Each structure stands twice: as C-alpha cells, then as structure tokens.
C-alpha cells in the first residue's frame, strides 16, 4: 500500500511575526514545528504501512527550511520525503496550495490513500485536504477518528472509517484511492528512534519546483489565489470588568443599563 502524507511546517505559536508589506508570515529565523494534527496523519500512515506493507511518502510545500520537517517525518519512519519549493509558490492561499500539492502527488504516481491533519494551526481553514481531493477527483472523508478495516467489495478495495461529528460519529465506507483528514483521537504519535534520527540525517530530500511538477503558473502563488490577506491588526486589549453587588433586582437593573449602553 502506497501512502502519501501531506504535512505543513508552521512557526511555533509562541513566535509568530507578520511581514507588514506582504501580510504573510515571516519564517526566516523563526522556530518552526510540524502542525500537530499532521503528526497524527504521519502516525496513522506508519500504522497502515506496518499492517499492509507498502511505502510512506511525505510531501510538503514551503521554503527551503521546511526540509527540517521532512527529516523529522523520516526519523519517525517515513520512507521518502518531497519538498515543493519555489518562489512561484509564495503567497499561495488554500486553493493554490492544494493545487500545487495535488500536482506534486500526481508526479509521485500511484497511491492508495492520502492522509492529512484535519487543519492547520495558522489558517485553521481545513480546506487544503478537501481541495487536494477535488483536484485529484478522488473521494474524501474528513475528521476521521478511526480506520476500522480495509475490505474488498466487487473487486474494489474500500476503507471503513469512523468520522467524528459533534453528536458522536458516522461510519463511512470509502473506495480507494481516497483522501482522509484525521483528528487527534485517531492515535498517539510515536517518538523517533535513534536509528530513525540517524537515517533522517543522511536521507535525500527530493526537491521539486513549479516547473518540475508542470504546475500552471496562473494557479499558484498570489496570481493563483482568489483570497488574499489585505489587512492584519492586533485587536485592542480587553478592558477590566466590574463587580455588580446588591440585591437581585438591583443587580439585574444595573446589568440591563450596562447592556443598553453597549
């Protein structure tokens, strides 16, 4: 079973800076991490590989320093890592990002399943995974909390999964190839082994440009992004509250007057 995992490297949430000219994240010189939800996707890919054999390929789009995230994935057990890096990708929104990743996955070749974390922690849109499935024209299931089984129906392999909802979960069957975005309830990510860390240092990271994946220049970067950040500002600090003391009726009247003023 060939498994592709899409990950993203983001600045640590304690050290986020914005370029005031471009309204994009400043990544140079900033401590970065793999999105936590993507760690669950990596772990689930490794478990599928251990159960069904095959290969785990991790792919990301980002600046050259995103190579560190890919090496971390290799230290955990991924077999191959691919970095899509090109100035032409700069400023991509979720649509342009999902397109570039989909083109990269096409270049990888055949696969059984694509795994993604449910969402990023910088944009929090949860749009890239579903966008990839649309570009590749494959079925998707989001918010997957458990892969129950892999079976065969009418000559076609099918995953039976549990999809988390606000009320509980849904049981869904999806044919392969497919895309699954996973939630943290699906597993407990492993720690890298010493052997894995040694291997990651020597591993070759495959690097592809926009030209390498035959990307349409009009569908990537700022030109390929229908949504753009036009303004970023820091919200004003919250003012201190106040205590309302007195009899119930008196307090209720004070509260109503305060709400009317606001």
Image: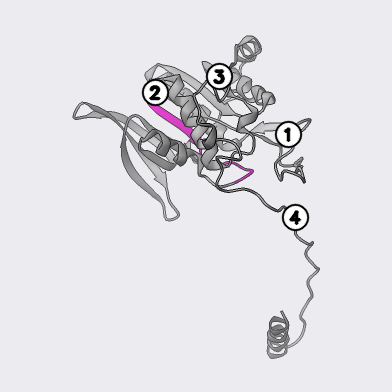
Pointer 4 with pointer 1, Cβ within 8 A: no
Check residue 111 in the rendering and tell me which mark sits there, or answer none.
2
Q: What element carries label 4?
A: loop
Does 112 appear in magenta? yes
The magenta-colored residue range is 110-123
The picture places residue 98, in percent across and down from the top left corner, at 50, 36
Front residue of this view, candidates 108 and 176 = 108
Residue 119 in view in this figure: no
Check residue 233 in the rendering and tell me which mark sits there, or answer none.
4
The picture places residue 52, in percent across and down from the top left corner, at 37, 20
Classify residue 201 by image quadrant: top right
Marks 4 and 3: which is nearer the front?
4
Q: What element carries label 1?
A: loop
Q: Cα distance, mark 4 to mark 3?
A: 36 Å
Classify residue 210 by image quadrant: top right
Residue found at x 65% / y 22%: 67
Marks 1 and 3: which is nearer the front?
1
Q: First in sequence: mark 1 or mark 3?
A: 1
Specify whether 228 is left or right of 19. left
Front residue of this view, candidates 245 and 242 = 242
Q: In the rendered image, which quarter contains the C terminus?
A: bottom right
Q: First in sequence: mark 1 or mark 2?
A: 1
Specify whether 17 is left or right of 206. right
Q: Mark 3 points at which residue?
A: 81
The picture places residue 156, in percent across and down from the top left corner, at 24, 28
**Looking at the image, is 212 positioned above or below residue 224?**
above
Q: Which residue lies furthest to the left in this view?
A: 154
Classify residue 248 by image quadrant: bottom right
Please tell me how crowded label 2 is: few (under 14), some (14-19), or many (20+) other residues with Cα within 10 Å.
Answer: some
The picture places residue 121, in percent across and down from the top left corner, at 62, 43
Does 148 appear in magenta? no
Please tell me how crowded label 1 is: few (under 14), some (14-19), or many (20+) other residues with Cα within 10 Å.
Answer: many
């Amino acid at each position: 079973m060939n498994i592709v995992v899409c990950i993203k490297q983001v600045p640590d949430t304690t050290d986020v800076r914005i370029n005031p000219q471009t309204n994009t994240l400043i990544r140079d010189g900033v401590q970065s991490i793999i999105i936590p939800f993507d760690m669950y996707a990596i772990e689930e890919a490794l478990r599928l590989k251990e159960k069904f054999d095959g290969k785990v390929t991790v792919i990301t789009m980002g600046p050259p320093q995103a190579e560190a995230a890919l090496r971390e994935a290799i230290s955990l057990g991924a077999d191959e890592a691919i970095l899509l890096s090109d100035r032409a990708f700069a400023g991509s929104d979720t649509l342009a990002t999902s397109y570039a990743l989909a083109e990269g996955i096409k270049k990888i070749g055949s696969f059984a399943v694509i795994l993604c974390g449910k969402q990023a922690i910088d944009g929090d849109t949860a749009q890239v995974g579903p966008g990839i499935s649309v570009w590749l024209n494959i079925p998707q299931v989001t918010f997957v909390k458990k892969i129950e089984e892999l079976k065969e129906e009418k000559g076609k392999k099918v995953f039976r999964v549990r999809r988390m909802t606000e009320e509980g979960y849904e049981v869904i069957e999806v044919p392969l190839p497919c895309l699954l975005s996973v939630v943290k309830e699906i597993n407990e990510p492993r720690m890298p082994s010493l052997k894995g860390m040694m291997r990651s240092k020597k591993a070759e990271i495959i690097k592809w440009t926009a030209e390498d994946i035959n990307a349409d220049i009009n569908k990537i970067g700022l030109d390929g992004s229908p949504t753009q950040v036009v303004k970023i500002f820091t919200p004003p600090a919250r003012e201190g509250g106040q205590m309302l003391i007195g009899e119930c009726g008196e307090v209720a009247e004070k509260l109503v007057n305060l709400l009317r003023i606001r």
